[in-house]
Structure formats: C-alpha cells, structure tokens
Image (cartoon, grey):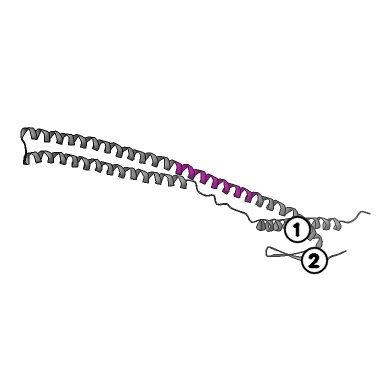
Amino acid sequence: MCFDPISLSILGTTLTITAKGAAIAAATAASAIAAPLASASANNRYQRQTAEARNRQIEANAEIANKSFLNKASLANLRLQEEAEASSLQLMREDLEDRQAQASTLAQAAETGVRGLSLKSLLAGYDRNMANRNYIVNRNLDLKEQQIGRELEGYRAETMGQINSVQPYVPQYQSAGVAGLQGLSNGINTGLSVYGSLSSLTSKSASKPKKV
C-alpha cells in the first residue's frame, strides 16, 4: 500500500515526506520534546527558588541593618542626654556657688559700709560670670548635638549601604512553549534523518542482484 507524500511546516520550513517518514519523525519528535520541557521546568523552578531565597536574604539583611542603626542612634542620643544632664547639674552647682558668693558679698558690704557703685560692680561681676558660663555650656551642648547629628547621618548612610549590598535576583525564566517547539523541530529533523538513512539502506539492499 502506498501513500501520497505529505507536507509539514516546521518553524517556517516546509518539508515533504512520505507517511512512513512522518511516522518516524513524529515518534522521534515525541521523545525529543520531553527533554527540553523537563529542562525548562527545572530551570524555571531553580530560578523561582533562587529569587525567593534572595528576597528572604534581602529582608533579613535589611532587618539586621535597621536594628544596628537603631542601636547606634539610641546610644548616640543617650550620650547627648547624659551630656545635657551633666551640664545642667554643673550650671546649677556653679550658679548656687555664685549666688552664695553674692550673698556673702552683700553681708560683708553691709558690715563694712561698702555701697553704691562699688557694690554694684561686685554684684555685676557675679552676673557676668554666670551669663558667660551659661553661654559656654549651651554652646558646647549645641556643638555636641551637631556632632551627634553628623554621626546619625553617617549611620544612615552605612545602613543604606548595607541594605543595598544585597541586590534582588532577576530570574531568567525559559518559555516551555519555545522549548517544546525547539524540541519538536529537532526531533522531526532527527527522525527524518533516521528515515533517510533507512531508506538509503533499503534501496541499496534492493538493488543488489539475487544469487541463483
């Protein structure tokens, strides 16, 4: 029984083969499709798992970086608070000493009869000392606060650098359809090649003279 040749169009290429050749090509293509599809599936699974693992790594890294920043910022603010409290206590103590000295000066002035401009000059000297001391302490606190602010900016930059050190993974997914078509094309070509080889061997065998 003979069958008319049939035409197949594979990825833009038209091939004309017999039904027997088509059967061999189809059988070969079926087995050839399975491997690329399995490979594409394994690749996509690996890509997805790698991307998910990287995302978890990014989250964990960001959490560690943020905790480190908060700890450093808390310690810096604590130093500033302790500095402010110590300066305040120092001012209170020295102001009390000056006021006690003023009271002593007033008492001595009353006993010795010192009054007028001389007394006012002595008292003004205490006031100037307190004002100067308050200015210096407050100025030092301002400088300390600016220093802490610069430290915090450095901590922020360090934190962002640590967070950005782990970049997202961009998965490279493989299309199962493309892999299947490639496998199909390769399988059909392989099948046609096998069919051609078999046909050639059959023709050579048929052409040999039979022994009588």
* Amino acid beneath label 2: Pro
Q: Is residue 115 above or below residue 187?
A: above
Q: Is residue 165 above or below residue 6?
A: above
Q: Residues within 10 Å of mark 1 (few under 14, many from 20)?
A: many
Q: Secondary structure at mark 2?
A: loop
What's the residue at 80%, 66% (across, down)?
5
* Amino acid beneath label 1: Leu
- Displayed quadrant of residue 143: top left
On whether residue 116 falls in the magenta region, the answer is no
The dot on residue 5 is 2
Q: From the viewer's perspective, is 85 left or right of 123?
A: right
Provide the residue span drawn in magenta. 42-67
Q: How many marks?
A: 2
Between 37 and 28, which is closer to the camera in this rendering?
37
Q: From the viewer's perspective, is 1 left or right of 117?
A: right
Residue assigned mark 1: 192
The dot on residue 81 is none
Q: Secondary structure at mark 1?
A: helix
- Quadrant holding the C terminus: bottom right
The x and y percentages for residue 161 are: 43, 46
The x and y percentages for residue 68 are: 44, 41
What's the residue at 53%, 44% (across, down)?
57
Between 189 and 205, which is closer to the camera in this rendering?
189
Q: From the viewer's perspective, is 116 left or right of 157?
A: left
What's the residue at 69%, 50% (across, down)?
38
The x and y percentages for residue 191 are: 75, 56
First in residue order: circle 1 vs circle 2: 2
On whether residue 50 falls in the magenta region, the answer is yes
What's the residue at 11%, 36% (across, down)?
106
Between 174 and 144, which is closer to the camera in this rendering?
144
